[in-house]
Image: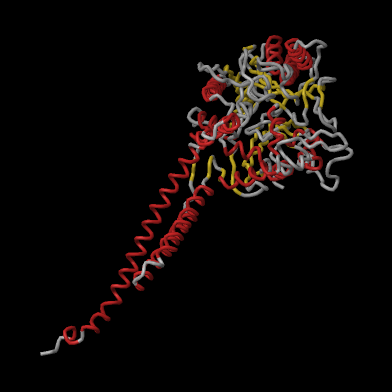
Amino acid sequence: MRPDIRQKDGNASARIGEAPDGRRRLIESAVRALALSVLSESLFTLISALALRSSGALIALFGGSAAAKLSEPFRALGSAMIVPRPLLPFLVCLLAFILFYMISSASRRRGSRVLLIPGVFLLAVLLCGALMLTLWLTAVNGVRVRDVALPLSSDIRSGAFGTLAAHTRGVRL
Amino acid sequence: MKLKHIGRIALLMALLMMGACSAPGRVPVPGEPRWHAGFGSAEIALPCTDGPFYIAGYHNGVEIGGVRDLQQVCALWLDAGGPGTLLLSVDCIGLGSNSVERIRARLAPLLKSERCLVHVVSTHDHAGADTLGLWGPVGVDGKDPEFMENLFAACEEAAKRALADRRSGRLFRADVETQGMLRDSRDPQIMDETLHMLRFEADEGAGIRLMSYGAHAESLRGANIRLSRDYPGVLCELVTEQTGDRTMFLPGAVGGLVMTKEFVETADMEENLLRTGSLLAGYALSGADWRELAPELSDCSVSFAVPLENTVFLYYKFLGILGNKAVRGGGSTGYSLETSLSLLRLGDTALLLIPGEIFPELVFGGGREKPAHPEIADPEPLADILARHGTDDFFIVGLADDELGYIVPPRDFLTDERAPYLKAAAPSDGSRHYEETNSVGPECAERIAEALRVLLGE
């Protein structure tokens, strides 16, 4: 009768079984990270679309006649054609979750929760970044938010909108 | 003796037949190519809603205060036995390519059995409802959705009538030089003072006249708040009254900014409108030298992109006000506007359909003595490009199939350093540079010249 190796050498059997378990855990973690990334990105897309659609009302919340006047054009975004550009923010989300898993598994190995604190912080920063990126890259009526935000901020900084009063006198086409 | 008589009679008959062939009402030879044309028009109904309902052309947020005459759509079908062309002339300030596409889509079921191209031209009416969206309160879309819907419905109705009206006949062409009618608000003083005309003489029934003139339709001027077709309406009505022909108007090279003069001393702009219309009608009916056009029609278009430099247009595009088709790439804004140029040949004449308000100097050549950028060369004049390809007789049709704003010569294109496209540049030489603020950018003129060269197979 052949001796049962598993009974004779328990440590060897654990070592043999460790590799498939690790792979499975890795695959499970990757799938979980992917699923969370998709979920987060969908959520961000929804949040940015909602933020853009309600930007008129949000600006009006600041109160005052200037805010009321400024909010008027943005109310048109309530029915605008909004197209998110999800690939880049999605990759940021994926990176965030992979980093988080790496940190949390490292914490588990060391039996310490200390590493998890900067991990959660990093995750939060990266998710906020992904949310901003989603908003930044979203196209409204065929024009990306970033392509409007950059010249707009430059126009505001240079005081060009001070001349808007002249522009309001009319568009003579 | 009898043979001699027969010979004389045969000679007489032959001479009579030759005479009949050269006379205006000659009998067509069966199988010979002929012109076919049809005309239709429809008024653009006013919306039933309370508004706000903005007047286009001058000031932001000014509501329409009455109606002088309703805006119209006129449709002209033309063919010479082969594929045809449907020209729509819409009494309005301008239509972006998105609106033109919507009109084409609406006409598609009507034209499914026809081989034709559809061109939609705006008369650049400065007394009409806002159809571009630029004249609401600043940053707010000035278009009324119901009015736009009525405009599309009127296009459909006019096209339907034009198709039903089709009949055969002869097509004629004439030019009349007008004098002292125009003023150019910016140097150089280059204007197209010619009233360009086409006349279709139907074998049966009323004829059709098409008139094109290079002046802004704004004889009612900026204080007007009554809806009207402006001088194109008065001109068309008077010519129809006098001749019985149905009439349509197309704008020419109006950039620059070219408009009709004020012909009254008082502030009565109604009188100015009537005077402008009747002066032009006088030219139209002044016994022009008409020549017949051979029944040959070709219509070709080319799409091209113009880099968008105007950040105000970009903001308006973002807010959904401007509907021109934007594509990524090109220009400092990172976007270009996709548009088209068309050349409609009728016999030995041609109509060059340009998607905006081109400065006449870009068509005929010339420029300011001391331009803003003497180191830059303007594109080759369009007339020279056409002449190189054997087309000496042509006229410009502006605001066709799109409205890109002013098309300014790059050599004299100057924007304000601090607020480009928000404020007009005011250089020390006192030259005017307002039109730049309502243009896509300095490259537009060159792109149009390039597109024409492509269209002509260069």
Q: Quadrant of residue B161?
A: top right
Q: Of B176 and B84, which appears nearest the observer?
A: B176
Residue at 41%, 49% in the rendered image: A42
Quadrant location of the C terminus of chain A? top right
Quadrant location of the N terminus of chain A? bottom left
Q: Of B341 and B126, which appears nearest the observer?
A: B126
Residue at 30%, 77% in the rendered image: A19
| B41 up-or-down from A33: above or below | above
Residue A98 appears at what percent x and percent y? 41, 64
Residue B333 appears at what percent x and percent y? 65, 46
| B224 up-or-down from B439: above or below | above
Q: Of B169 and B446, which appears nearest the observer?
A: B446
Q: Does residue A114 appear to the left or right of B122 in the view shown?
A: left
Residue B218 appears at what percent x and percent y? 72, 20
Residue A146 appears at what percent x and percent y? 58, 47
Residue B305 seen in the figure:
yes
Residue at 81%, 27% in the rendered image: B184
Q: Quadrant of residue B414?
A: top right
Residue B23 seen in the figure:
no
| B355 up-or-down from B149: above or below | below
